[in-house]
Image (spheres, grey):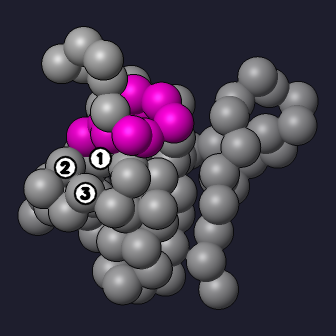
Amino acid sequence: MTSDESDEPDGESRQLFFMAPDHLGHWVVQDRSCSRSGYFTNREWAQKFALSENGRRPDLIVELPEASALIFRQVAFHNSDASKSRAPSYRKAA
């Protein structure tokens, strides 16, 4: 086993995630590669999503004071018809 390998199924589960509230008070979560994102009604659900996606590593979650343009770029599809685009799917907590 090399130093890059671990007991986790893949390296993607160890990626850095960013989370921040948007201007409406909802929480946006996105990984560094912009391949996994979520839009949540509260911080608790946003954090649970990030932990479930990154292999339960709280040290790999960066909480920002507000959602940046980088995060909004990906989550903008949330309110549009994503089925007509090649946008990745997103999860929304109730």
- The residue drawn where x is 88% and y is 30% is 84
Quadrant of the rendered image containing residue 26: bottom left
What is the chief secondary structure element of the magenta stretch?
A: loop
Q: Amino acid at mark 2?
A: Leu
Amino acid marked by disc 3 = Arg
Q: Which residues are magenta?
A: 7-16
Q: Do the residues bearing badges 2 and 3 touch, measured as CB atoms within 8 Å? A: yes
The answer to whether residue 25 is above or below residue 75 is below
| Mark 1, residue position | 17
Return the residue nearer the eye: 10 or 51: 10
Residue 63, image quadrant: bottom left
Which residue has dot 2 on it?
60
Q: Nearer the viewer, residue 50 or 86?
A: 50
Residue 64 in the image, given as x and y percentages of width and height: 14, 58
Q: Residues at badges 1 and 2 in contact (C-beta under 8 Å)? A: yes
Q: Which residue is mark 3?
A: 57
Mark 1 residue type: Phe
Residue 62, percent from left and from top:
15, 54
Q: At 47% across and 52% down in the image, what residue appears? A: 53
Q: Tell me the quarter of the picture where residue 44 sits.
A: bottom left
Q: Is residue 15 magenta?
A: yes
Task: Describe the element under mark 3 as helix, strand or loop.
Answer: loop
